[in-house]
Structures are given as C-alpha cells and as structure tokens.
Image (cartoon, grey):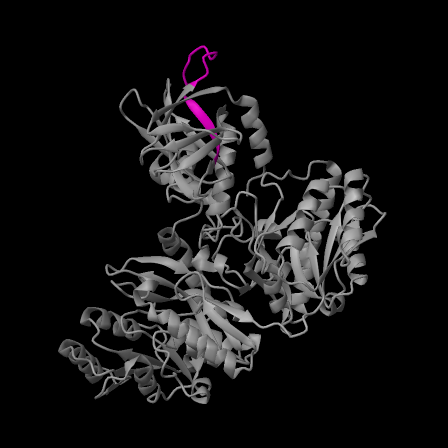
Amino acid sequence: MLSKVLKPSNLKRLAYRLAKKLIIVPHHQLTEATSESNGSSWVTTGDDPQFIIHPARRIPSRSFSKGWYLLRVKITEANHQSHVGKLYSNLQKGELTTVDVPWHSTKFVNRLFYLGSNNSMLRFDPCEAETEFTLNTFMISKVPSFIAMRHMKQRLYKLLSHVDDVEEYLVTNRKLNGGKLIETVYEEYNKTFTTGVMEKSYPFWVEFDEPRALLKMKQTFTQAQSEVKFSIILPTYNTDPIYLKECIDSVLQQTHKNWELCIADDASTNADTISTLKSYAQKHASIKLNLLSENGHISKSSNAALSMVSSDYVLLLDHDDTLPAHTLSFFAKAITDNANAKVLYGDEDKIDEQGNRHQPHFKPDWNPDLLLSQNYICHPVVYKTSVLKKIGGFRVGVEGSQDHDLLLRATAGLNHDEVVHLPFILYHWRVIENSTASNASAKSYTTDAGIEAIKYFLDQSGQNASVEKGKYPNTYKVNWALPDEQPLVSLVIPTRDGYDILKQCLESIYDKTSYKNFEIIVVDNQTTCDKTLGLFSEYTNAKANFRVLKWDKPFNYSAINNFAVSQANGEVVGLINNDIEVINEGWLTEMVSHVLRPEIGCVGAKLYYPNDTIQHAGVILGIGGVAGHSHKYFHKSEPGYFTRLHLVQNMSAVTAACLLVRKSVFEEVGGLNEQDLTVAFNDVDFCLKVHSAGYRNLFTPWAELYHHESISRGEEDTPEKVARFNKESEYMKDKWKKLLCNDTAYNPNLSNTHENFSLR
C-alpha cells in the first residue's frame, strides 16, 4: 500500500494554487448561449465541437512547457448525460496526441496528462453530440512528477480491484515493457479512462474480475454438491439450428454432470429443428425429447417438458440462450449452502448474434416489490420441483409473461431465506432481431400478459390492489387501496428560521396534496427571524391541522424528531425537511398506501434537485463507506439502471428528508438514535433498525418532490464538524458492518464508490 496518498482536497488546493489563467477560444461548431449560471454556456452545432486553449499571455514562454499537468473540469449539460471529452496536444506538429476525459454533468473531473514537448496551444473537444452545456470550471495546472505519480496510483488502487498487489503488478509491467515506472503507471492510468465511463467497461470486467470471482467460488466446492441433480426444461419451436446447437452444447459442457435435459418441441414446422433435436437425443442418454403433435404455445410446451422431470430441482432454459459452463456447479453449491432454498436465481447478460457479451444485469437479492414492478429475476431461475408441482406448473393465458407469472406464484408466501440470489453471471440471453431481449416493445403483448399475471397474483393472495402499465414496456405500477377511513398522518418539519424555504414547503403541502387527513407539526429550534415567527402565527391561526412545538435546545436532529413523534396524533408519521416542495398531488396518497401494508416499514419518495436531477431515489449502503443516494445527479427523465428510477422497489434505507412510517413501528425500534447520531446517518440507522425488525423498506418513484438542498453543498468545514461526522461515520461502520458491506438491495459487482450503478 502507499505510505502517502495525496488527498483529493489537497489536490484541489494544489490546482487552485498553480493554475494560470487560460485563454479559451471556441474554434468549431460552438455558439455562445445566454446563461444565468456561473461559467460560459455553449450550444454545439454539430458532433465535433472544439475549443482552442492558449496559456495566459503573462506566461513568458507563452506555451505549455514539457511536463505533467492536471486538468480539472466541471461541465453542466442540458440533458444531464455522460460524455467523453478529448484533449489534444501536438497540434502544430500534426501528430495529435489524445487524452480521453469522460465526464458527467455537474461533477468535477480530475485528469492528469503528460506533454512530451512544449505546446503553444491545446484543443479540447467537450463531446460528440449536439447539445447545450455550461463550462463551469476549466483549469490546467502544471504539477511536479511526484504529485502526478501519487495521484495516478491512488486511482489505480481504487480501480484495479482484480489485482492483489498493485505495486508488484506495476513493477512487473515496467520490466516487461522496458520502461520507467512512471511511464508504466501513466499507461495503466490512461486505460482507466478509455472505456468512455469512469469505471471499467464490461469487457474489462469479463476479462479480469469474473475469472477471479469464479476461481474463488470453485475453491469452496465439496463432493456433496455433486449429488444435487438438476432437470433442465427446454421448450423449443422452429429454433434456428445454429442457436439450438449452441444452447444444448452449453448444457453438455457443464462442469456439474448430474443433470437431465427435458426438451418439449411445440410442433415445429422447421425440419432442421426437428432433425437437430433427434440427433442430440440419440447421442446423449441424459436428453429426453417429446415431439408434441399440436402447437400449444410456450406455457403448454413448458408444462410438457416439466412432466418429464425426475430431479428435485428444475432450471428453465430458453431455446436460443446459453449457460456458462459453471452455472449448475454454482447452483449446486448454493443449494447445499442454503438448506431452506426453494427458488434460486443468478445474474445474467446478453449475447449478440456474433457471441459478444454485453448489458450485464447485476440484480439485488430477493426484492418482492421490485418483482411486482418488473420481472427483474428473469433468467436464470432454479425451482425446487415440489414448488412447481404444488402450483401446477405454467399457467395458460399469460404467454409472453409466463415466467413472471410462474415466479409470482412460486414465491408467494415464501420467507426471505427461501429465495436465494447468486451474484454471478450464470446465463447468457440471446439478442436477435425482434427478440424481447433486443427490444422489449417488439412484443408489446408481453406487457399486457404481465398485467394479467400480477392481477392474478394480487387476487389469489387477497390483496386489495390494482395494477396498470408502468412508464416502460414490461414495467408495472401496483396501486394499493386505502381504507375507507383514511388514517391521520402527522408530518413533522423541524426548522430554525428559514422563512423562504419553510413558506414554500408549507404552501406546496397545503396547495398540492390530495390526501387531506394530515396534520403538520413544525418543530421550532430556536428561531429568531421575525418573518418566520410571523409565519408560525399565520398558519396556527389559519389552519386547524397546524401546530408549532418549541425545541429550545442545541440542534439534535434525532432528538427533535423523537420529541415531535411523541407528540404526534397520527397513526402514520412523516419526517419532512423544511426545504421540501411538493410536485405531484398524489405524493402522500401513494406513500400512505404503501406504509399501511403490514410488511412495509419505511417509505421514501423520489426527490429532485431544483434542476430536475435526482437527489434521492433510495439509499445504497456502503457507498463512500456508509451510504449514498441511488442514481444521484441522473436527470429525472432517465430510466436508470434497468429502469429502476421508475419502479417501486425495496431498499435497505431511504432518506428522512421525506420518509413515512407507522408510529407503532417508529416506537417499536426506539425511534432515531439521539445519543450517537445527532446529525448524520440517523435516518440510515433508523431504516436499518426497521429492516432488522423484519419489515421491508420501500422506495416509490410515484411520490415526487423537490429537495432544495444545494447540489454544491459544502463539506464539513470546521474541526468540530469534521470530528462529529467522523465519529458518527465510525459508529455506523461498527454497528452495521455486515449490512454496509453487502446491501441486499444492491449487488456486490456494482460500484461502492459511485452512485451510478457502474461496475465495481
């Protein structure tokens, strides 16, 4: 490990100290736009916009001299997308040297680069798209070589997670390449930017991380696992023989040999399909084949395959998909490790017609509300045969979403430990023209079938709820009915002064909330502002469901809310920040409809910054050490990771900026921790206590509000604040270490540094 690491804050200070004023000239496909924000705003008129960068005239040489430089950039883009900028040097020599600069709207990027000779100018191409952006910060600072080395190593230690000893790896590469160590480090450093994103690309992950994970798993295999037998059911219909052979061959190549393949062909009219099936069945005794005489569609043919099963466990396989060679071995291990397992599933990716792997889906652990919003489990799934027999196999009438229907019925009533997730790629889903994998809208009837499947599940389980289409194909919104007598909701809003934001908050709640049975409890923490005190009086006189409680003690967020909840009259309590602004009138109805479900604990809302980017869409544990916000800074129009920004789902925690919970649950877990967590992480701690008590926490995107917290919110800026924050952070790490290391609503293959669902 490095004995000394240059902290980002130190690097920033160095940049500000060494930066010289630059002359930035629009050169190609750029038109200046008017903007009220800090920085210069531009509209690109093509896909090749260019700036020319000159050093300040006061620099005697009027050139960027040979050496190491730090580029520091912050750009705000109109659509809040990610882009890859490019920095060019050696322009005058005609030997362009390119440095990739991937950036995401509103985030700072630090990028080191090396100039091998003097340059009178550089060129910066911000993107390759027609868009509008503001160049908030653009700084180029010359830095000493030892600073450059430290910064590059710091990044490599973070991103080369597949390498056990980074120093040894770099030294070995230097010897192989015959160069200096700093040259080798720079080469490896540059590789981390060449994927077009801030993290490793999926091909890079497949090449390095996956083999390392597989090796670690294989080292724990035992002889007992070989006794687990699988029946793989494979319905076929006019399958292209090329893909059919690849599919069956992937079964034959399994490292786990205790299996049978049960194939039911749905009266194919393609002679080559039938010939291929017969050939395999004749050569391999473990393959059972049933050639159906009449076409009955996917559910009937799947049931025909299921009728041939003789094993305790069933794995579903589509006729043009493939299994990695280790799939059955991993499931066998999971079965022996989890005695109660009745349904098991893994992660998956897609494979194109040329065999290239892409678009991995790294899934959360068992997430019942996400399954009601989308068939996130999809492939691969292993069922205990007795479960499928009990529910009668596949249901006719939901073709197109028969797998989703089967999952809903098979998991109904199962405990958390009976549904097991394996965080490994165990299935390759074939993408061919007009396939559902390629284009969900190519088979629009699948969404209708999914609605029928969810409706049936809700009816059979006695739930008072309805279902409708979601925002995207094959996504759904379940509407949970409220009781005839709607419960009182106590909305707790702590404040100190803050007249403008509190007034906006109160007005938006009263003017834009369709749910009427609520009370507002404002907790006054030593307000001295006359206008704010006047606002208290105004609302107290005008609104029967408004009152003010006094908290004449130093600020303690946990204690303030605990006190207010103890005085609340509602069956449901809502913790609301004073800088919240309601957007959609159904926000409270939506949140109450979930919080009244007996199995649900805390319910969180979808919060936006004023510029319509995501401030909160659920909390991810472990980000930055303790917790971060899912999809932070994504634009509200973006789908998010596999459309999760628009799906109701279970999360380990949600923010208390807008959180609803039943008062009985709040009291059951002892409320917020006012001894150890006075300011930070008290909401995460509270949610984890609720989670540990057996409730499911939930995020809903259908309750939308603005959170007027500043995007550029300052860091802890005094020694006292830093000490308090560090103490609270350490408390969380000590108390919740196991959960922080493995958020069940996330995936260990995804980043614990960034909030954008990029690869770890």
Q: Magenta stretch?
A: 55-75
**Hey, which quadrant is residue 704 in on the image?**
bottom right
Would you say 556 lies left or right of 79 here?
Answer: right
Task: Reply yes or no: does residue 62 show up in magenta.
Answer: yes
Would you say 449 lies left or right of 586 here?
Answer: left
Placement of 136 over or under 279, stated as above or below: above
**Hey, which quadrant is residue 28 in on the image?**
top left
Q: Nearer the viewer, residue 572 or 753?
A: 572
Would you say 507 lies left or right of 361 here?
Answer: right
The residue furthest left is 271
Q: Is residue 371 visible?
A: no
x and y percentages locating residue 198 in the rendered image: 44, 44
Indicate the quadrant containing the N terminus: top left, top right, bottom left or bottom right.
top right
Placement of 540 over or under 403, stated as above or below: above
Would you say 282 lies left or right of 115 here?
Answer: left
Placement of 642 over or under 101, stated as above or below: below
Task: Reply yes or no: does residue 216 show up in magenta.
Answer: no
Query: How many dots with numbers?
Result: 0
The residue furthest right is 552
x and y percentages locating residue 98 in the rendered image: 34, 32
The residue furthest front is 542
Q: Nearer the viewer, residue 41 or 721?
A: 41
x and y percentages locating residue 606 in the rendered image: 56, 55
Identify the residue shown where x is 82% and y is 45%: 554
x and y percentages locating residue 631 in the rendered image: 51, 51
